[in-house]
Image: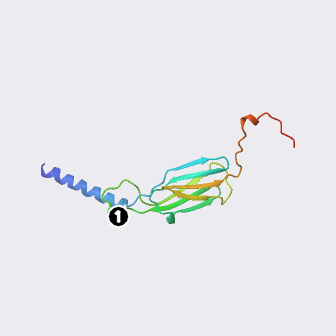
Amino acid sequence: MNEPVLARLHHLMTLREEVETLAGPVPWSPAADWTDDDAHLCLHLDVPGVDAGSLEVHEDGDTVTVAGQRPAPERLRRGERPSGVFRRTLSFPEAVRPQSGQASLVHGVLTIRFEKRHPTISVPSSDLGRAPQEE
């Protein structure tokens, strides 16, 4: 290659390195799902590599906030997995009893189980249309 092209490539690489240095760590956001088991709502967050001691859960009205930190690997050569601090605020899909959350961390999935304020009552279809039994 000729000198002007190499000089431009070198300049572009230098600019790229400067931009990457300025960006610093990017906050990440773990994926979340809500599930319903009639009497409870369960929040599931994917937090592999996050130490349980770094996790914080705060309920506030109709939202729950989960925060934590995943450390960056030492001597990282190339990385795609996010690290650092995260904070996720989610709205409850329906009303729950305040301060009823119970958390567990299994295989990198944080599950928080909340009691519903108005649980769903399952009635077998065979009981529908039947008159109540007197005792």
Three-letter code for the amino acid on which mark 1 is drawn:
Glu
Q: Is residue 55 left or right of residue 133?
A: left
Q: Nearer the viewer, residue 71 or 135?
A: 135
Q: Residue at x 65, y 57 (%)?
A: 61
The quadrant where residue 115 appears = bottom right
Q: Residue at x 52, y 63 (%)?
A: 55
Q: Nearer the viewer, residue 96 or 115?
A: 115
- The quarter in which the C terminus is drawn is top right
Q: Residue at x 22, y 55 (%)?
A: 11
Colour mapping used in the image: rainbow
Image coordinates of residue 119 in percent, x first then y, are 70, 48
Image coordinates of residue 44 in percent, x first then y, are 54, 52
Q: Residue furthest left?
A: 2
Q: Residue at x 50, y 62 (%)?
A: 68
Image coordinates of residue 121 in percent, x first then y, are 72, 44
Image coordinates of residue 101 in percent, x first then y, are 62, 58
The quadrant where residue 130 appears = top right
Q: Is residue 9 left or right of residue 126?
A: left
Q: Secondary structure at mark 1?
A: loop
Location of mark 1 (residue): 74
Q: Residue furthest right?
A: 135
